[in-house]
Image: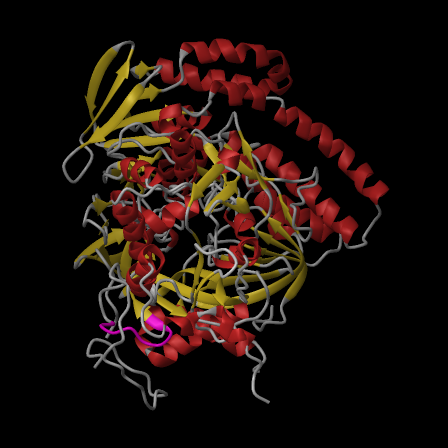
Amino acid sequence: MTRDNSESADLVIIGSGPAGLTAATEASSLGLSVLLLDEQEEPGGQIYRGIETAHPKTARLLGPDYQRGAALASAFRASASGYRPGASVWRVDADGTIAYSRDGQAHIVRGKRILVATGAQERPVPIPGWTLPGVMSAGGAQVLLKSAGVVPSGRIIVAGNGPLLLLIAQQLITAGANVAAILETTEFSDYLAAASSLPRAMQAGDYLAKGQRMRHDINAAGIPQYSGVSHLAASGDEKFKQISFESGGMRHTLSADTLLLHAGVVPNTQITRQLDCDHEWVADQRYWQPVLDSWGTTSCDTVAVAGDGGSIIGAEASAIAGRLAALDTARRLGIFNLAERDQRAAPLRGDLARHLAIRPLLDTLFRPDPAFCVPPDDETIVCRCEEVTAGDIRIAVREGAMGPNQLKVFTRCGMGPCQGRMCGLTVSEIIAASRGATLTETGYYRIRPPIKPLTLGELAALDDKFPTE
Amino acid sequence: MFRRLHDAAKIAIEFEGRILQVAPHETVAAALLADGAEHTRTTPVTGAPRAPYCMMGVCFDCLMEIDGIPNRQACMTRVQDGMKVRRQDGVRRLEP
Amino acid sequence: MLPNIRIGNEVVGASFCPDDGHVNPLRLLRALHRGFLRLGGQYRSCCEVVNISHEYHRFTAETSGGNFTAPKIVLAAGHGISTLAPMVGLRVPIRPQRGQVLITERIEARLNLPITDVRQTDEGGLQFGTTEEDIGFNDGTTLIDTSRIARRAVQFFPQLASVRLVRNWGCVRVLTPDKCAIYDESESHPGAFVATSHSGVTLAAANAYRAAEWIADGVTPPDFGTFSARRFDVPAAA
């Protein structure tokens, strides 16, 4: 591949999770020139992290859902698609220009079409003490397991909700880690409420069976489980020592070495936000998603999204969405017509519907806990970078900060290196709750480039690639 | 604190002047956690200790000084033989 | 004069003015809001003014959040002034001009003086800029301009090459034809004032003291008439 600014491709894909891998494989098999940029050093995204290098024992304990990623990665490797690992995309423009950095050098690539396959991130879990060393996101612990075969060594407490919470607990138990307790905010009533979604979910019976197996393994291990947990607070001096919470009308305090927090995953919208694409608030799951057509195209015609970055649909559905986006790209670039696109897509659409059948059940069962969305305790840090608390935000709202962008000016909330990724949702929720406004009225941060930090030196060197005035 | 499930081939990195044997291919953050590191930086605002949180490049809480370059994401940087890693203590310095 | 930072070889000279200074604009805005509320002011956001009526020496601002009446009204609404000024018989020629700015991560304190296009806030972040672009109300950014700003920053101070950029924004200035402030009272609607300047940060002290006294007490500072928009009525000499 060339290294100058003339580099281009029919389709540039950002992200190598299931959606990015299948899109790249499909699009290159259709004769399109494809370049896949990925921030990690190996394909797989977070869900299949380390899929090519994980120790066989680790892969076995992560189970068949994880191992499924190996086939996607090898199909991608066998395809004609270009691949640039370790490429951190920091700017995307609607004209198809993508700027990224790799090994300390900035580059520009142009795509006739761009597919954003940047997946999900975990929903922030702002509770008192969540910034203490010893507290980690449950997904972070899973990345450690997948990528390095590393597990917490002392007593572990897993807290929050969502299917991933139980999965991680199960995987840690299988790995021989000492899971001391599982604290779920989910209440028994949530299971009853979810029952109405069961008939549809039966179409995705394998998901239900997996859920049952997780429960069974956790029960068999004899791990104490608390449900309907509220008022979670981590504490410790300089590092995490204990967690206190309420459950069953009682206050509990448990000591441990590691606290793993999880409250579901949400679309990573940094790129579609930076592009100023239209986004909508999903009320039951309490997250923003880009507005997409059924092929993944955003309100910006040159850009599509596939996978969890568009809406949380899971790995297998994402793999299908990647192929659908590739088919539509081929149609747009004149490889075939609408009728052929639709004909090729028909079997994929059937599979997609089957995978999505489980979603209403999961969405009802694992609604994000209101206390995770709007932390009630004023002392809770919301912006981890700038150390802005929920109380600081509420004061700023009283003093006139009516939206997230004004709040930035008032408090520096969201202005640190993570560029709002860890506080954005919470900030919108707190402002909306304080004002009695809807989330749509309240809005979200205006995300500006660079969406990943790069050095001034890297940016300055790009200047050579533009014609001088 | 964390531990490794499997023994792997080892390379040497230096953390705060101490030599650690770590597995190749893993990230600096994973290597340090597996070695028992507690905090990996202090914040520039209040000096509070922090450790890696998300392990996927989102939270920027794992910023460290790696081979003399401050504020690098330890969870996004792979270990290399002879790498020198230090905690990022507060606000970054400017190189001479 | 800049003992804590190395100056690039391409820098051949500099100017210095002992009156130069800078203020953290975010802290200034918050302080002004807080001071205003503490003095008993009311701040109502989400109140887009749709009309201003004038009856019995009183102005009524009709807004999306209700009507507000007072004997005096001040237009300080940036580009919103273009819509509002004709409602009170004022002519305020302003135009948009985009400026792009780069913001870096926090670094230790190194710049003890503000410099043209480069300054360091008390929090440690560096701000670079800026461009002057006549492209309407587009407040986006461009790769070409931002890389040029970065190039210039590194030419000034080579040590900054390793400093990370965390944000890059564009903003639309409110510019008058001669780029100087306009302070004016309406002749047809006495009690209606306009105050606009680029920038409200630079001129915050003048606005808080001189302009405020002029509006509230009718104390016209010497030569204040110079700032009237009537200066633009005079045809330029051929």
The chief SS type of the magenta part is: loop
Which residue does the image show at 35% across and 25% down from the upper left? A371
Coloured how?
A: secondary structure
**Lateral position of residue A237 relative to residue A10, left or right:** left
Rendering coords of residue A456 (x, y %): 40, 69
Instruction: Please tell me which residue lies in front, A290 or A210.
Output: A290
Which residue does the image show at 29% across and 31% down from the upper left? A127
Quarter occupied by the N terminus of chain C: bottom left
Q: Which residues are magenta?
A: C111-118
Which quarter of the figure has residue C38? Answer: top left
Residue A430 can be seen, yes or no: yes
Instruction: Please tell me which residue lies in front, C153 or A358.
Output: C153
Residue A66 can be seen, yes or no: no
| Vertical side of A143 occupied by B94: above or below | below
Quarter occupied by the C terminus of chain C: bottom right
| Vertical side of C28 occupied by C120: above or below | below
Q: Residue furthest toward the front?
A: C56
Rendering coords of residue A85 (x, y %): 51, 57
Q: Residue furthest toward the left?
A: A237
Rendering coords of residue A281 (x, y %): 54, 34
Rendering coords of residue A459 (x, y %): 45, 69
**Lateral position of residue A300 relative to residue A445, left or right:** right
Which residue does the image show at 43% across and 76% down from the upper left? C151
Residue C93 on the magenta span: no
**Lateral position of residue A141 relative to residue C173, left or right:** left
Instruction: Please tell me which residue lies in front, C158 or A328.
Output: C158
| Vertical side of A200 occupied by A280: above or below | below
**Lateral position of residue C136 relative to residue C171, left or right:** right
Disc tally is: 0
